[in-house]
Amino acid sequence: MIKIQVPATSANLGSGFDALGLALTLYNRVWMEESDIIDITTKDDIVVPTDETNLIYWAAKRLYEECGKRLPGLKIIQENNIPMASGLGSSSACIVAGLLGANRLIGSPLNENDLINLAAEIEGHPDNTTPAISGGLVASAVEGGRVYSVSVPVSEKIRFAAFHPPFELKTEASRSVLPETYDRKDAVYNLSRSALMTASLFSGKTENLRVAVQDKIHQPYRLGLIQDGDTVFRLSYELGSLGTYISGAGPTIIALIESDSVKNFEQYALKNLESKGITGWKLSILDTDPSGASVSIA
Ligand code: HSE
């Protein structure tokens, strides 16, 4: 069997809607081998589709077809650590696992750029799939069906406090509340901040982050879909967040923090929420994953 490990990803980083994303130290793992039948199981109690609608299987089949091959069936074992419909790239992780696994099974005909292009085409935007493959902080743009991207490291000063609410939010629903068009001044507002975000995360210029997470494209419309989200934003700043944003399409909210704020977050964040009657949220402290998805022999 082969084993594929794919990191969670946090897209947008506030201002970089559909353009910026980074890989985090939280991983889904998938074991895969060719089979005559579709045989899909999980190592945990997460319920996943066990037929051809399973996203890992579907992506693997797509890669086989792309390479002119027929996929008879697959044995897949999933370990799902990235919460689903949470804004941490769980569907991208499945797509990437399916593509990378299938590519290895047929002798690696596609290179990393081909895989990045195919993953973004399947997902519809590149900001989760590209960092899931490359690791690091990734800026991506799509032109003529091709992803142009660069992955850079994030300053070691910066860590990620992820607040996970006790409910899901599907990307489709979260995209459906966004306007079709925007004012030029709002576009400039975001363009300037997303450029600032990339350079500040890379260089560790942490005093810029509170401005760089702001945006006028998606967060103002989505915050209302996240019950108690406004309280989590406020609380994170009280505990020393450098900048707080809705991760991807939500509902996870991420506070960028310095290492010396970790204790404060771990000690007080959930307690303070509970004291306000807000229960069921979880907190994880994560770092940037520098190298992205990997494939090995199990
Ligand atoms: N950029 C995407 C969005 C990420 O915000 O809708 C979630 O898939």
Image (tube, rainbow, N blue to C red):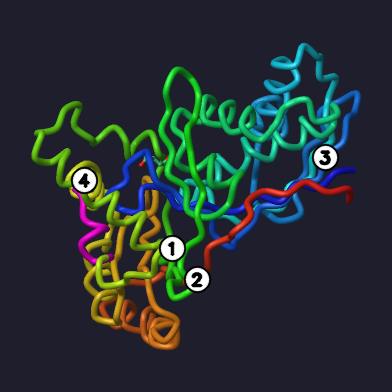
Disc 3 versus disc 1: distance between alpha carbons? 29 Å
Which residue in the structure is indicated by mark 4?
190
Ligand 1 within 8 angstroms of badge 3 C-beta:
no
Dots 2, 1 in contact, CB < 8 A = yes
Mark toward the viewer: 4 or 3: 4
Q: Position of residue 80 (x, y in %)?
A: 65, 52
Spot occupied by residue 124 in the image (x, y as percentages of width and height)? 46, 28
Identity, as a three-letter code, of the amino acid under mark 1: His
Q: Quadrant of residue 160?
A: bottom left
225 sits to left or right of 104: left
Q: Are marks 3 and 1 in contact (CB under 8 Å)?
A: no
Badge 1 marks a residue whose secondary structure is: strand
- Foreground mark, 3 or 1, reads 3
Q: If you read the primary sequence from the N terminus, does the residue marked by circle 1 or circle 4 appear first?
A: 1
On the image, numbered disc 3 is attached to which residue?
32
Question: Which residue matches tag 2?
Answer: 284
Which amino acid type is shown beneath numbered disc 2?
Ser
Dividing the image into four quarters, tell me where ligand 1 lies. top left
Judge whether 22 appears above or below 255 on screen.
above
Q: Decide which of 218, 136 is in the foreground and name it.
A: 136
Q: Are marks 4 and 3 in contact (CB under 8 Å)?
A: no
